[in-house]
Image (spheres, rainbow, N blue to C red):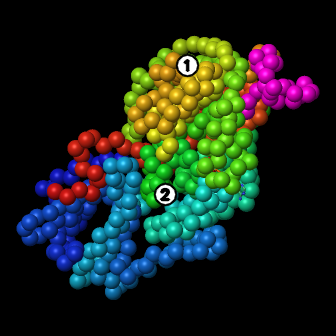
Amino acid sequence: MQLPEPNCDDEPMLVTTVVIKRKRCWLRFHRGYLIWETMKAPIARWTLPLTDVLTATYGNEAATSLPLAEACKEMQPAEQVVPATSTTFVLHYAARDTKNKWRRHEVVMSHDDSRQVASWVKTIRNYLAKHTNRPRKILFFVNPFGGKRKGFKIWEKTVQPLMTLVGIEFKVIVTQRPGHIEEVLMNCELDSYQAAVCIGGDGTFAALFNGLILRSARDRRINLNDPAVELPKPRLAVGVIPGGSTDTLAYSLHGSTDVETACIHVIFGDCSGLDVSSVHSEKQLLRVYASILSYGYLGDVLRDSEKFRWMGPQRYDYSGFKKIIANKGYEGEIALLSETDHPSTCMKCTNNCNRCIEKSRTEDSQDKVSSWLTVRGKFFMVNGANVSCACSKSPMGFSPHCHIGDGCVDIILVRHTSLLNNIRMLWRLSSKDKTLYDLPFVEVYRAREFVFRASHSLNLESTASTDCIVGTESSVARTAVSVWNCDGEVIDAPSVKIKVHCQLLKVLSRRMQVPPPDSPSCFCFRL
Ligand SMILES: Nc1ncnc2c1ncn2[C@@H]1O[C@H](COP(=O)(O)OP(=O)(O)OP(=O)(O)O)[C@@H](O)[C@H]1O
């Protein structure tokens, strides 16, 4: 949130002199900004929006870090006792660098009169409590199993100390098994929380919002198995702190998979509307996803890579190599409710994205939808991307112009072609500046709904002459179709119906920002 630049000639709300690094400075609190400047030449001035302040603490207050076992009990924020003797206070704030990474900084300010110090600490804390939407109590889930199995460390080293510092009350649950997050969310008391946040990868985040949606649906008696259903909006905001293998969601939201950055987004409490898509079979709701649903190659890779989890994230390279050699294409038909604009003609989705803001204001933009379109063929893979799906290995992702809150998915169809072209496509995916859009065997559409039907019979014909088919009819059917990779979870039903639910989730992120070339690198700038 950008505030207007303060006019320093106006009357300040609060002003005093403080000592910072042995220099006497004026300190002003004025219209949502803190401004401090040296009193003697050479004059230097710093301007900091209060929205970027994390907290203010007394000089003799120390941030404590608890072992995870103790933190699993519900934690109250430490009693904010005013140490009457303190003549210093520390201003903790966050600043963003050019690579979308937010870092915590602090300035120590001193004053001879401890009442002045107490007044500043109180004023800053009161402002943050009253004029921002910061969560006061958060339910955390830590997946100790995702990515390089660093969930515990991330909690203990970075997340817990920061939450304690800013006085956020929390409860933390360490996941014991797949499905644990959904179980907890279906049964626990949620009324006292403002947000639920996970430390894990895309699969853990998916478990978090699937659990919240299931809970909201049960509370409101909504039958989710109807494919036409409008999913209920969970009341709680959600957040993700990267602790997985690819962490595409964290990357697409914050522009970085940095843990401290993600924590700072959670603390700031500013929310962006995130679309999610429901995946139905003929009979029931299978899953809701926020990142990508992918059939064919990526489905095969996921299914195979689960056997090699002990390898860590490198399992994807190993299975990826195996499955690209083995891929013979999958027959299918996709019917999509297509929007008129092509993804490549859009701006990238960053903070204050006009397209997403516009969609959040208009109730239903069906008028913009053109028509149903059908595409048939043999595919290397079929993807429905809800976000750009960028990650450190693929800085542009599947669809760099995909929007997180426009009520659409970008459908990327990669036709069955030669092994060389498949490798070319994967190579392109790792590029820093090129997209898949212009490859001759790739088709890209933007849609609000789509239906995919796997063509077993066609596939049987095409694979009949190969060694894939052995034995009974059921094993024939198994080898003839692929599975879906749904935010890193396998869905075994090849024929599915997908519907986008515009900005169903409030996700804790200020989003990535694209700085103008010559702008200062952070909001706290020196004049
Ligand atoms: N204690 C646990 N033991 C075993 N599996 C768990 C446990 N806790 C969670 N899981 C499962 O771990 C799986 C992997 O988690 P996650 O997707 O977050 O990590 P990842 O696959 O390494 O990362 P990414 O999805 O970003 O590639 C999820 O399917 C989740 O259900």
Q: Front-most of 308 and 474?
A: 308
Which image quadrant for residue 70?
Answer: bottom right
What amino acid does circle 1 point to? Phe
Left or right: 286 with respect to 109? right
In the rendered image, residue 405, in percent from the top left (x then y), is placed at 50, 35
Q: Secondary structure at mark 1?
A: loop
Q: Residue at x 29, y 48 (%)?
A: 3
Q: Residue at x 35, y 79 (%)?
A: 59
Q: Earlier in the sequence, mark 2 or mark 1?
A: 2
Whether 324 is drawn above or below 97: the answer is above
| Residue behind mark 1 | 441
In the rendered image, residue 127, in percent from the top left (x then y), is placed at 36, 61
Pick the quarter of the image with the C terminus.
Answer: bottom left
In the rendered image, residue 410, in percent from the top left (x then y), is placed at 54, 27
| Residue behind mark 2 | 259
Q: Front-most of 100 and 148?
A: 148
Tell whether position 460 is magenta: yes
Q: Residue at x 49, y 37 (%)?
A: 430
